Image (tube, rainbow, N blue to C red):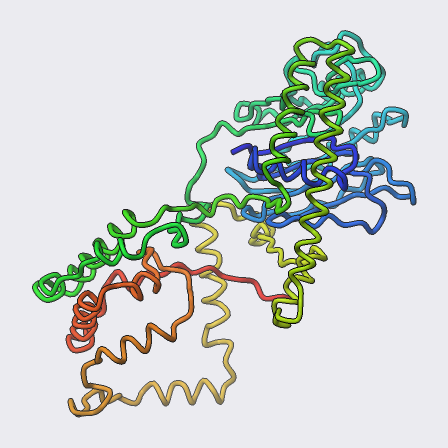
Amino acid sequence: MASFVSWNCRGIKNKFSDLKGIINLHQPSVIALQETYLKPGDTLPLKHFNILLKNGTDDRATGGVALLTSNSFPTLPLTLNTTLQAIAVQIHTHSLITVCSLYLPPNTPVDQISLNNLVSQLLTPFIILGDMNDHSPLWGNPDTNTRGLQVEKLLNDHNLCLLNNDEYTYFREPTRTFHSIDLAMCTPSVFPYFSLQVGNDLHNSDHFPLILSDNRRQNPSIHSASRYNFKLGSWSTFSSLANITKEMVSDNSIDIAVKNVTEVLIAAADHSFPKISNTFKKQRKVWWNAHCRETHKRQRKAWNIFRRNPTTVNLINYKQAKANSRRIQRRSKRESWERYISSINSTVSSKKLWERVKKTSGIFKSSNIRILYNNGIPVTSLQDIANCIASELSRTSNSSNYSAPFLNHKIATEKKKLNFHSSPYAPYNTDFIFFELNRCLSEIRKTSPGPDNISYLMIQNLSDKSLHNLLFLYNRIWHEHSFPSCWQQAIIIPILKPG
């Protein structure tokens, strides 16, 4: 998984499908875009990502930068006081780091004070990604221009490290030449952890994407656990393998019996269903088909031939393949759209209708995990985050928050002794019956499984014999007043209410 991607897209609206391709290929946590060509008020809806934009200031779509951060990671946008085309965000992946997307137009003068002011506002450690239109032998150009000298001075004055190597990042089509003008620079403390690679595909731009990989070992605890994909498996295989026997639930203690049943269900599910991970959600392109895939493959093949042998004939062949690929994609999008619209008819329910209207308009729910601060200090370790949340819950539910009349009533009520002795023949003390179990299973809704990864769907698809034995275990728990210790664990996700 790439940590960060930087790409001058040269207009994001007509490169949106290319952006999705980059995301699916590199799975970044942050994408820094330059030259988005968005006008004031324009937005960029993208599922599973939070968008931070700085668009052009006039009606003509020029310049502009953006930062796309995966909503799987805590983030906090930073407010920059600068006239430069720059935006920044703090994100916690392996550790807390600031990422800045910067675009310096080639024909717009930039003074050194503005660059110094920008760097001074970035919280350390930080990484600056962007197209700076700078030439210098330090990053692979044969010549040096004024902007290159400015960036060299910036690196030297602020003790920054350059992550670039000698790979070219920009293709100038009129002269058929390659240059290196897109940079990645960082503070020394994070320099050992990152390696930079330049992508080999332009993705219909004239800049190659920069791929920054974090060499530190990924912390698996910050991602969701894998789950079963019940759509691709076999329920008949599961039912035959998930054999809960009478001995399993009657000859052992409650804890051991529950453990045995859990192991049987998990083993049966492992043999019956593939697992999918929630760590990365791909960007869908519903219109993408085999014809699109084939023409895109030809375009990449023509580009690779031109890279190895940059002749006029090979350039023409590449441009023709590119034009053909774009034509096929436009046709596929149009046909997919017509099919989608045709599916909305009088038989569609109002709920489904509005779902499709929202999907068509690019309206969807977007979650944003914010970085947690305690007394102005960022809380980053999982243990500290849990302690911080628990401390806040303890404070808000403390008795000192109650009014005096309610507190007196609470104290008086808690002094009363409860009588737990009741008639064994009372309806609520009798055994659960098979009919009641089936009725409960037929009425439950689909919910996320707990730490044992057992879902209601798995229990619903057990054989009658296994369900009867499972019911025997439930009645044992009810009569012996012994609640299984593993059932006392839960995955709790605190959700911040709006406002």
Give percent across and percent down for residue 41. 83, 51
Give percent across and percent down for residue 95. 52, 38
Residue displayed at 57% across by 24% down: 191
Residue displayed at 48% across by 67% down: 395
Left or right? Give the position of 473 relative to 119: left
Can residue 499 be seen at all in this image of the molecule? no
Can residue 113 be seen at all in this image of the molecule? yes
Give 299 or 460, whichever is nearer the viewer: 299
Q: Is residue 57 above or below residue 444?
A: above
Residue displayed at 9% across by 63% down: 247
Give 77 or 49, whichever is nearer the viewer: 49
Residue displayed at 66% across by 71% down: 346
Give percent across and percent down for residue 117. 79, 33
Q: Quadrant of the C terminus?
A: bottom right
Give 409 or 427, whichever is nearer the viewer: 427
Give 158 or 328, whichever is nearer the viewer: 328
Left or right? Give the position of 461 relative to 12: left
Number of labels in the image equals 0
| Residue 132 falls in image quadrant | top right
Q: Is residue 304 above or below residue 121?
A: above
